[in-house]
Image (cartoon, coloured by chain):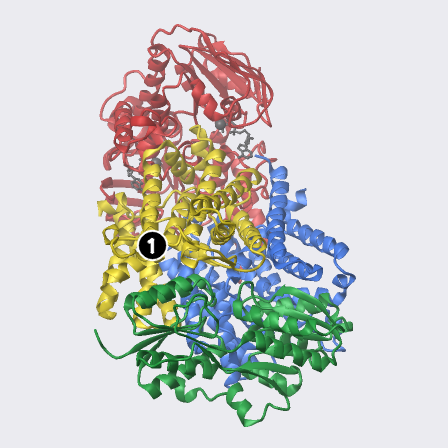
Chain colours: A blue, B yellow, C green, D red
Amino acid sequence: MKYLRKYPFLGPLVAVVVVYVIFAIVAPGSFTRAENLTTMAGQTVVVGIAASGMTLVMLLGGIDLSVGSNVALSTVVCALCMRAGAPAILAAAAAMASGLLSGLVNGALVTTLRITPFIVTLGTMRALRGLAKGLADEQKIDAPSSGLDALVAPLPPGYGWALFPPGVWIMLATSGLVAAMLVYTKGGRHIVAIGSNEATARLCGVRVERVKWLVYGLAGLFAGLAGVMEFSTLTVGDPTDSVGLELEVIAAVVIGGGSLAGGEGSVAGALFGALLMTVIRTGSTYLGIDNWVQDIVTGGIVVTAVALDRARRASETRR
Amino acid sequence: MKYLRKYPFLGPLVAVVVVYVIFAIVAPGSFTRAENLTTMAGQTVVVGIAASGMTLVMLLGGIDLSVGSNVALSTVVCALCMRAGAPAILAAAAAMASGLLSGLVNGALVTTLRITPFIVTLGTMRALRGLAKGLADEQKIDAPSSGLDALVAPLPPGYGWALFPPGVWIMLATSGLVAAMLVYTKGGRHIVAIGSNEATARLCGVRVERVKWLVYGLAGLFAGLAGVMEFSTLTVGDPTDSVGLELEVIAAVVIGGGSLAGGEGSVAGALFGALLMTVIRTGSTYLGIDNWVQDIVTGGIVVTAVALDRARRASETRR
Amino acid sequence: DGGATKIAVIPKGTTHEFWKAVHAGAVKASREIGVEIVWKGPLAEDDLKGQIDVVQSFVAQGVSGIVLAPLNDKALEKPVEGAVKANIPVVIFDSDLAGSAHKSFVATDNLAAGRLAGEKLAALLGQKGKIAVLRYQEGSASTQKREEGFLEAIRKMPEIKIVSDNQYGGATTESAFEKAESLLAAQSAGSGGVDGVFCPNESTTFGMLLALRKAGLAGKIKFVGFDASEKLVGALRDGHVDALVVQDPFKIGYEAVRAMAEILAGKPVAPRIDTGAVVVDKASLDKPETKAIVAPDLAPWLGK
Amino acid sequence: MAREVSGVVAHGVTKAYGATTALAGVDLDVRAGEVHALLGENGAGKSTLVKILAGAVRPDGGRLTLDGAPFAPKDPAAARAAGVRLVSQERALCPHMTVEENVLLGGEPTRFGVLKREEARAIAARALLAIDPTGAKKHRLRPDALVRDLGPGERQLVEIARAITEPRCRLLLLDEPTSSLGADDVEALFAVVSRLREAGLAVVYISHHLDEIRRIADRFTVIRDGRTAGTGRVAEATPADIVTMMAGRSIEDLYPRSPRVPGDVVLSTQDLAGAGLPVRASLVLRRGEVLGIAGLVGAGRTELLRAIFGLDRVRRGEVRVGAYVGPASPAARLAQGVGLLSEDRGGEGLALGLTIADNVTLSRLVGLGPLGFVTPARMRAAAARFIEKLGVVCAGPDAPVGSLSGGNQQKVALARLLYHDVDVLLLDEPTRGVDVGARAAIYALIDRLACESNKAVLVVSSAAEELVGIADRIAVMHKGELGPARPVGELDVRAVMLEQAGAS
Ligand SMILES: Nc1ncnc2c1ncn2[C@@H]1O[C@H](COP(=O)(O)OP(=O)(O)OP(=O)(O)O)[C@@H](O)[C@H]1O
Ligand SMILES: Nc1ncnc2c1ncn2[C@@H]1O[C@H](COP(=O)(O)OP(=O)(O)OP(=O)(O)O)[C@@H](O)[C@H]1O
Ligand SMILES: [Mg+2]
Ligand SMILES: [Mg+2]
């Protein structure tokens, strides 16, 4: 029990394992094959990377609804660069820069206009979507994906030692870095402090505005990186991509122990939250469940997972 | 200035008027025709009615993401009843009952499992969508709409005295009732008190769980009513309808002065918030603006409207 | 105002490449005839209510005529009747509409097109094997017709088994891709569980293509898709897609606006104008007549 | 060369919140190496002044100098960099973080932004040792304990610990630092403050307890209505002088006591035990009497009241209210005529975002309009009556409670019980943070309630003197066990303090 408090991600981890085992029992044998694990890990990359940034924003007590649009914009930027003949690394950098910039705009609006992040990012969600459509001329952009296509593709033969495609490792690395930042750096502590009690943080000399700015920027950067992964999956720049992604990312963070009120959240938990949703989706397809049943099941599992996790934590804290 | 505190909806009202006047100047003359006013009012009905319920939920400090799915489910129920030959009034009642029921489920989950409403309604959002698809057999349901089709259709000749179609009057009536309830009834005061400080409300003998339950139920009922209006517009029961409606409704409430933290919000304000978005959308259509430009403009106006409103209110209170 | 003739053209969405070609066709017709067109779809793709709102706004605005690709055959009936009542004639294109208020219907025959696809895939498989269908979206009439036509043709072949036909790819490429990936794995496509696949529109076809490529099955499983885009044509060349059923979007847009202009000029038009569909495979790809359909030059019309 | 003035000087500082003038030109002169008491009634502007010094509020006008140099901190970070630390009246803690993280917040030792964990631990341990020299609270005030698990007293200690960690501190501002502290914690705090004074810090100390002032402060400044009303050496002024200066009048009798005749039993508990605390509590409360409950912080007195009122679970034992036996919800208790005044004003007692009228009328909204409806005008009228009766300083019944000073907020919370017209008042620390004048008014009110209105009053207080002054009988709680209630005649302040420490 004590572990749950110290490692809040254990709850969602258990949920993932339980759901996986259930599917492993009821679904056809191929569900448990190693390839399927790799596939599911790959499908989690976009949400997982974006969830790192969202965890930071939600720890702060904020929210970022623009993440889906930001990902779409980033795929477009990436595709435009690739089409213009830029090397893969440059295109990826440009996509991440566009994400960072969008995030910084969010941060600037939140801190200077002092409007609630919900409405700021609701606005930029629309605006960035429009920008993406405009840049892409309201079309999907075909572009060569050489150099980036290997990010989430299955490993070529002979590279089995890597276990997962590079994208998965990048996701794990970002999550690890962010988690370490939260624990081991001053900035990380300040993020949690602001989310826990902003007035207090300010009174203690935390430069609240600056920290917020940076966090929204970082979240944007991660959205940009997620966009690169998305481009590598789609191999086109798609301005209508990732509509509704924000809710999925937020759900991942909340399943992972995050709270919309700030001060709570875990990067590892968010990763498991993202994985949980992938497992449900894949498992349902394996079972050949009708779409509508799958919708109901997903809804039910998400609520149940969070309910169990919270009940456990409550029984441990009491009152 | 004093008025703004007393009548928080003045801010969004001013925003609507300003945006309307701007479009009246730049758009072709037909924008200011009476027909267009009626059309815009009619297009606001669904969001406007749903926003009444959302205002209540957000006053409580909650949120209801399932509203879009609930509306879709309600159109399906309505269509099924109509197809089965039920009279219009019965079909509408059934649709509203399905909305109420869904809302009560939300309420029960929020109060008994004590999970954050965000995740509860994220879950029911999926589940209700699935239910709607299942009920509709994954198809749009054709049904006669006689009796309900007049709700938001333009007025037939000879009824010009009514000014607006009945749906608009129903929206105004619900908003009026909810607003009056908030100010003039015990239950309304209790809702505001819970949103402002739940512990205080409990200390004062407010039956917090019961009130929450009822409020989610009411929100569901309004979603059901909105679904009836949606059915009357669509004339089919559409299980894939109103995806993303939740964000639009929440935006209306927030533009109208509501806060995600609870304790703040105005039904009239939410109505103007909804209207603002309709005016922008219609104005853009009149101007023949490209979709992507419209996205950017909408995002910009939403943020600006809220920013101006908040700045004003802040200048009146001061730090 | 009594200004120039202004025709509103309302597609289902604005970002599919299909609609770009339709747009170009519409522009071509408008230039030839000398009318003004306004191109405006719902903001979000496949947003039924949004499309109704757009129609209503154009009616309130009082345009001369409306050319509409309805997202639903029933739901748009009322708004169209409203337009007709306001003396605005309506031409329907791409997908059909119930009722009789509109003057003409310009589109591909989707049922027939679906049948074409079914026959092609059956031929590719030599009339036997296991196939899977990745459907598009619940309640989308035109793709449902294609799926129906396809299944109808396939069911005539006793030795072809349908292993999955209840999975939907959803509105976006990414959702289609994820669905396709899981579907292929679930049916053990890698070890012979699936011999052929069919997808009823551009986004599902592309999503399936990506999934096949990722699983290393592209070219091994027979694949018939729908609609064309640069990447899909490329895949056809690579042999990753065996055939595409292609409509003529440019012609659809062109004919629809033409029909509207005729109506406004008081001339009679046919109630049904079929714009046809063809099966394109690697062999027929480079024929000039296919080229004009598959990759029309849009630049002169859309100005880019 | 002129001798450098060390310390902080404020001259003509003004600040207005909308229509409310908080400061109308305050002068303050605090020198290094002294403890300077800042006194005044509730709403006088004490907190506003120290917040200005700490950079948390921007003044509208006036001049500040720190050690002779002009001082205009643009935010708390700037003030902190200049060596100013504040323990604010509102609890400023991050509930999701640990004690150590809270103590170090804003001053984390780092190298290239990475925390130096060892050093951090050492700093926090030192600060905790200073405020808890006997180690009595070591098991709860662990560096890795989460602040949200701590009680009010412990939280206050954490804040103080944070304030004294700063090595470069020149000016320490303590805004009612002892409001939630028990006697031994106050001693520890005084020891720390004395040490800091010796080290040459300037300390501003705000408190409503004149006895504390007499013990710790060297000089004092009284603020009245946002202006400096007087200043002087503590040793040279009598408490009566200071009170007169604060209130503009003298207060004759702090604890008025009319003849009281105990009536029927209205509330009794038998071996009551809550989920954690209390362990066992039996008491009997009659109409027309005031029963005091003494005890140290953490003894479980608050939990006792909450269990009676139905806010906490009752594990064992029974509660009898009039003829009704058994546990009940707060709503039922209110219906039975029992009301609770919470010790946590901001967190639970009041909805700070709502108006005075809303807060006063919330528990009883019936009868405020025709047909069971509620009309704002009647709500306002009802609240206005009590604003006048209790002398709440405010802009009117529509003022948000959050804009009131602490003492006035307390009066609003009390007004709710009066408005509801409960028969049994459960008062948890009713005078916490309340100024002398208002305190006298509350004592007089409690007296009137008991003897004129024949109500039953149960008062929990950490100030033994106060209990002895107002109660008829006092029971002492120790580690969750409630002792027998004895008439005040048999007890004095010393006896109560000894007993609550467990020496009986
Ligand atoms: N944020 C605010 N908004 C509006 N008015 C405020 C605000 N803060 C303080 N005030 C007002 O300013 C005046 C001074 O308040 P302040 O908190 O400084 O008093 P105080 O002397 O500390 O009182 P107490 O002893 O009760 O703590 C009061 O009238 C109060 O109502
Ligand atoms: N929210 C809380 N979570 C966990 N423990 C708590 C909480 N509040 C109080 N406690 C603990 O419960 C015990 C008793 O609480 P409390 O301090 O309120 O008792 P009390 O006798 O009423 O004292 P006082 O009212 O003087 O502070 C203390 O040890 C305290 O730390
Ligand atoms: Mg104060
Ligand atoms: Mg207490």
**C248 up-or-down from C77: above or below:** below
Identify which residue, A268 or B274, lies in the foreground: B274
Q: Secondary structure at mark 1?
A: helix
> Residue A261: percent from the left, percent from the top?
48, 48
In the shown orientation, is residue D33 left or right of residue A246? left
> Residue A42: percent from the left, percent from the top?
65, 67
Identify which residue, A270 or C156, lies in the foreground: C156
> Residue D39: percent from the left, percent from the top?
31, 32
Identify which residue, A1 or A147, lies in the foreground: A147
In the shown orientation, is residue A226 left or right of residue A126? right
**A155 up-or-down from D485: above or below:** below
- Does the numbered disc 1 mark a residue whose Cβ is under 8 Å from ligand 1? no
In the shown orientation, is residue A286 left or right of residue A48? right
* Neighbours of disc 1 within 10 Å: few (<14), some (14-19), many (20+): many
Amino acid type indicated by mark 1: Gly
> Residue A109: percent from the left, percent from the top?
38, 61
Q: Residue at x 48, y 77 (%)?
A: C107
Q: Is residue A208 visible?
A: no
**C74 up-or-down from B310: above or below:** below
Chain ID for label 1? Answer: B
Q: Residue at x 56, y 76 (%)?
A: C202
Residue highlighted by disc 1: B273
Identify which residue, A163 or D408, lies in the foreground: A163
Q: Is residue D276 visible?
A: yes
The image quadrant of residue D250 is top left
In the shown orientation, is residue D178 left or right of residue C30? right
Q: How many marks?
A: 1
